[in-house]
Image (tube, coloured by chain):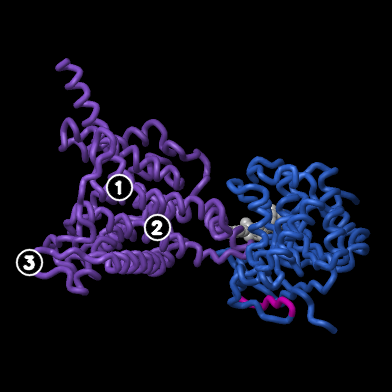
Amino acid sequence: MQLLLESGDFLARLLQQCANGVAKGSVYALVAVGYTMVYGVLQLINFAHSDVYMLGAYFSYYPARWLGYMPDGAEKPKVPLYVLGLAFAFAVTACACTGMLIERLAYRPLRNASRLAALITAIGVSIFLQNAGQMVFTSEVKSFPRYVDQTSVPLGPIAVANTSLIIVVVAALMVGGLHLFVQRTRTGAAMRACSHDMRTARLMGVNVNATISLTFAIGSAMAAVGGMLIAMDQPRLTPTMGLLMGLKAFVAAVLGGIGSIPGAALGGLLLGVAESVVGTWNTTYADAVAFVALIVVLLVKPSGILGKAGREKV
Amino acid sequence: MADPVLQLADVNVYYGAVHALRGVSLRVDEGEVVTLIGGNGAGKTTTLATACGLLRPRSGTVTYRGRDLAGVPTHKLVAQGLVMAPEGRGIFPNLTVEENLMLGAYSRRDKAGVAADLRRGFELFPRLAERRKQRGGTLSGGEQQMLSIARALMARPRLLLLDEPSLGLAPLVTQAIFATIDRINKEGVTILLVEQNANMALRHSHRAYVIETGEIQFSGPSAELRTDPRVKAAYLGEG
Ligand SMILES: Nc1ncnc2c1ncn2[C@@H]1O[C@H](COP(=O)(O)OP(=O)(O)OP(=O)(O)O)[C@@H](O)[C@H]1O
Ligand SMILES: [Mg+2]
């Protein structure tokens, strides 16, 4: 009887961890999509993507602050819904523009240069954004506004935070919507065409530069949403908050098969769940899961779970 | 006299230090099929790429319907009717046959017209209709060539640039492709055709240019060139 109870406990705890992992993994997926789309079109690992994620969190912090919902010292007041909408719109737009700007200024001039040159530039942009973040936002931890009050929602034998539910729903809608967009629309077909062969895409009348800009805009907007969602769940902002997230999202993209949007989703979820489950036993090992996963994938199937060996992208 | 559809005047094109086109001049008039023949590396593909703006001449001019094309990006030319079916067919293997075709109509906004042209394309190439949901990469070489031409037609070209449509095809398929070229031309599309199969190209064109090492060697009506000893020796495997 005692044993049964214990194993029931254990199962519930495992389920609980899986649920937490799904929420975490959903954000990995949101951010991973940006890596995967850019890689699909340009074969470039956009290191600056993790910093766009960080910017997304800050950009969704400021609207509430500007409108006076962040008094110093005092208890933070609840932010009304319209401000939340405003913050969302602002973060998404500002990050999309940032992403397009990065492509226009840093990557486009190197479109025909060696891949190594582009890669080094990407690292440079990332360092630049982190330092600009330190200067503008200061390195002091900022506490995120009270957009949503955390409550616990019972779900069968377990209970999940309402923020976790929001994260999962929003991420699923966005990644699913993006997948449909890429697979079903004319613009999506143009993106897939560019990822295979830009020269021929141009012969079809596709404006390749505009399509690449759009790719960056979409990926950055998704990262912005990821940043905002994480900040709701863990309301602490720092200019270096993108580092670990970027790394894990990148691993998620590789794990699922870089270039594939469903792959990014799958990789994100797998990684999130694996981390949470490992975290049940030992929290310090949780962060190592990503590295182990990366090594295993690169050894066993470098093209990732859903990746094709060929040049199938996006 | 009306403006030619396409005119290259004293065009020089370089790949870095490689001087690929040396003072090339040619013209294509409304309603014509003009062929450009020459051996490997003669500069045929380079000529077509320059005509549609993928490459920019270092000197000389390219005019399309009387307008200088300097600075006009390739993707805008498609909407104006200058369309190329590239060497090696350029099929997107990850897209279905139908998606490939619809991409050909990317610049067009007239949904009804596009739908009608899609049906026409399938009439012209019934094989493609059977395979419309299949990925482009799974088609045979001949089917891919049909798809490449059908896709170019989806843009409603006024000038169609074809780069070696018979490359790697069996004789029967080659004949079918050339019959299609005749038919497209009869329906009013002007064509500039690059070929290594000089025999077929000269039978299915009005005029021809011969290019070697980036220079136009000579030109004339195709019927005359077919009996020209220089052509016979070098390109028709006779004499
Ligand atoms: N990207 C490039 N960089 C450098 N040289 C090039 C490039 N593309 C073509 N060339 C050179 O330019 C010349 C003309 O090439 P082009 O592709 O136009 O020949 P072609 O007549 O189409 O030949 P083929 O019948 O084999 O297709 C060749 O000498 C080729 O080596
Ligand atoms: Mg060629």
Q: Residue at x 70, y 65 (%)?
A: B83
Element at label 3: loop
Residue type at tag 2: Gly
Q: Measured along the vertical axis of the image, is residue B32 above or below residue A271? A: below
Mark drawn on residue A74 = 3
Residue where numbered disc 2 is placed: A219
Q: Is residue A188 magenta?
A: no
Q: Identify which residue is drawn at 72% across, 57% down.
A: B163
Residue B134 position in % (x across, y down): 66, 42
Asked which quadrant contains residue B212, the reply is: bottom right
Mark 2 neighbour class, 10 Å CA radius: few under 14, some 14 to 19, many 20 or more: many
Which is nearer the N-term, disc 2 or disc 1?
A: 1
The residue carrying mark 1 is: A165
Residue B41 shows in the view: no
Instruction: Name chain B's colour.
Output: blue
Numbered disc in front, either 2 or 3: 3
In terms of sequence position, does the residue under pointer 2 or pointer 3 come before the other?
Answer: 3
Hey, what amino acid is under mark 1? Leu
Q: Which residue shows up at 31% across the image and 43% down it?
A: A25
Does residue A154 appear to the left or right of A223 in the view shown?
Answer: left
Cα gap from disc 3 to disc 1, whole angstroms: 29 Å
Chain coloured purple: which letter? Answer: A
- Above or below residue B103? Residue B142 is above
User: On the same chain: label 2 and label 1?
Assistant: yes
